[in-house]
Image: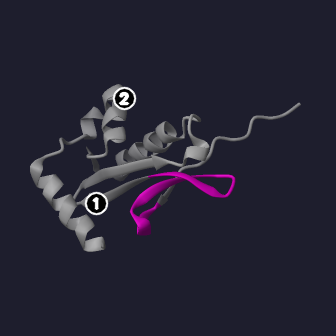
Amino acid sequence: MNRPSPAPAVERAHDRHRYEIPVGGRLAGLTAYRDHAEQRVFYHTEVDDAFAGQGLAARLVQEALTDVRRSGMRIVPVCPYVAKYLERHEEFADITDPVTPEILHWLKTELRALT
């Protein structure tokens, strides 16, 4: 009888400003962020096509948002996937801030500095 494999663990790669979900020794997905004062601004989420349809993006984002809550920070969902997730999961509404023009300008400046 086969045992179900354990759910992949989400890891925060703080030095790379992202949460990662590895599967079988490969990076299956990530959600990227930048910290702005007490806010964690999520701007990109992706899952490798080889791992699509396994619910990994939802697990990744749920664990990332739970980590933000534990840290005492707030969520800013610039990433469309994170924003959609938050629409369906109201348990994070109390720590979610709106995306503002100021945040978008700040994020653009931050990301431009990386290139």
Q: Is residue 42 magenta-colored?
A: no
Marks 2/1: CA–CA distance: 22 Å
Q: Position of residue 54 (x, y in %)?
A: 59, 35
Q: Position of residue 27 (x, y in %)?
A: 58, 56
SS at badge 2? loop
Please give the label number shown on residue 35: 1
The crowding category of the residue bearing disc 2, from other C-alpha atoms within 10 Å (few below 14, some 14 to 19, many at least 20), is few
Q: According to the image, label 2 marks what residue?
A: 89
* Part of the protein shown in magenta: 13-30
Judge whether residue 32 can be spotted in this image: yes
Q: Position of residue 53 (x, y in %)?
A: 57, 34
**In the image, what residue occupies the spot 30% across and 37% down?**
83
**In the image, what residue occupies the spot 69% across and 41% down?**
6
For marks 2 and 1, the one nearer the N-term is 1
Please give the label number shown on residue 21: none
Residue 28 or 76: which is nearer the viewer? 28
Which secondary structure dominates the residues rendered in magenta?
Answer: strand
Q: Is residue 17 magenta-colored?
A: yes
Q: Within the image, what quadrant is residue 5 found in?
A: top right
Amino acid carrying mark 1 in the image: Asp
